[in-house]
Image (cartoon, rainbow, N blue to C red):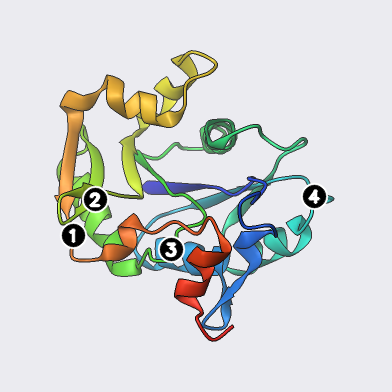
Amino acid sequence: MIAAIVPAAGRSERMGQPKLILSIAGRTVITRVVHALRQGGAVPVVVVTPPRDAPGAGLLIDESDRAGAIVVIAETRPPDMRASFELGLTHLERSDHPSAVILTPADSPGITAALVSQLVNRAEAIPEAILTPTFQGRRGHPIVLPWAMALKSRELPQSAGLNSLVALHASEVVEVEVAEPGVLDDLDTPEDYQRWVPSQ
């Protein structure tokens, strides 16, 4: 079993509004991400959200649930992606834990089921590796962490982000060349959004 954790508790400060409930081609960003993960073979998909009273959180929670995710609602807004990720890990520890975790930024509308399936297949073939997709030589997301490696995030210095975990274990990283430029896309600013919905 290869699970996915989607840290979705950020403030969307550069977007100026809750970005994960914005619509692209008739579906919210979070719905697109969860569907891609589930259809690509990630089981389960855990979405970590801010408290329901945070701006836009109610719809984010409802959309994640309707898309088929397990929703972990933080009691207080996590300070960063690492904290959200670790809340997801804690949830997964409560049952039979997966062999690996796909760490998936929530603001990644370019992720497809085919990409996820490719990563799941590689993770099953080389379960000890950290997998990172690359497009034309550039690393993107989501990344796949073996379960034992994912747990090591808790050993990082308090100020360190998840990129530090990958850097510390660089010899265990395997790059997976993909044909999808969406692995490089983030949805951070209104300009980013306009590239996806130029008519809106």
Q: Which residue is mark 4?
A: 54
Identify residue type, mark 2: Pro
Q: CA distance from mark 1 to mark 3?
A: 19 Å
Q: Is residue 108 visible?
A: yes
Tell me the SS state at disc 4: loop
Task: Identify which residue, 137 or 38, lies in the foreground.
Answer: 137
Q: x, y (%) of residue 52?
A: 80, 51
User: Is residue 169 shown left or right of residue 39?
Assistant: left
User: Is residue 180 shown left or right of residue 107?
Assistant: left
Q: Which residue is mark 2?
A: 133
* Label located before the other in sequence (1 or 3): 3
Which mark lies nearer to you, 1 or 3?
1
**Mark 1 vs 3: CB contact within 8 A:** no
Q: What residue appears at the point 52 percent right and 66 percent down from the top-left corner?
A: 191
Q: CA distance from mark 2 to mark 1?
A: 6 Å
Q: CA distance from mark 4 to mark 1?
A: 36 Å
* Label located before the other in sequence (4 or 1): 4
**Residue 174, picture quadrant:** top left
